[in-house]
Image (cartoon, helix red, strand yellow):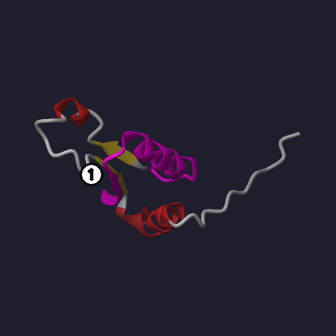
């Protein structure tokens, strides 16, 4: 597994995790339980998302597009 994203914001980490997983990446998060240590641990980049090495390049591109507001969504009409 290779790091593709890190944040100090739990909600943003969950949003990016959802984006990755909904696009078919086997993304995993870590650091979710470290929030209990805030005040005793540095509160910077607690949440880390990782993907398998063979998916890293494509996942990093998706994260880059998210961070630069260039992410395109392809909505299908389900009616």
Residue sitting at x 23%, y 50%: 44
Residue 54 horizontal side relative to residue 39, left or right: right
Q: Is mark 1 on a helix, strand or loop?
A: loop
Of 77 and 42, which appears nearest the observer? 42
Q: Give the range drawn in magenta.
A: 1-26
Q: Which residue is drawn at 21% across and 45% down?
A: 43
Q: Across the whole image, how many numbered discs are drawn on residues?
A: 1
The answer to whether residue 11 is magenta is yes
- Give residue 74's position: percent from left, percent from top: 72, 57
Residue reaching furthest right?
79
Q: Sort mark 1 into few (<14), some (14-19) or many (20+) by Cα contacts within 10 Å.
A: some
Q: Quadrant of the N terminus?
A: bottom left
Quarter holding the C terminus is top right
Instruction: Please tell me whether residue 21 belongs to the stretch shown in magenta.
Output: yes
In this view, the residue in front, 44 or 19, is 44
Outermost residue on the top side: it is 36
**Residue drawn at point x = 52 percent, y = 63 percent:** 62
- Label 1 belongs to which residue? 45
Could you tell me residue 15's position as x and y percent? 49, 45
Q: In this view, does 12 lie above or below 61?
A: above
Residue 57 in percent (x, y) is at: 44, 70
Q: In this view, does 20 lie above or below 61?
A: above
Quick one: 5 or 76, which is closer to the camera?
Answer: 5
Q: Quadrant of residue 11?
A: top left
């Amino acid at each position: 597994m290779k790091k593709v994203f890190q944040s100090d914001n739990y909600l943003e980490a969950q949003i990016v995790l959802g984006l990755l997983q909904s696009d078919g990446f086997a993304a995993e998060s870590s650091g979710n339980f470290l929030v209990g240590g805030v005040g005793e641990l540095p509160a910077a980049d607690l949440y880390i998302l990782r993907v398998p090495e063979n998916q890293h390049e494509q996942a990093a591109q998706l994260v880059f597009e998210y961070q630069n507001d260039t992410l395109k969504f392809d909505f299908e009409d389900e009616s």
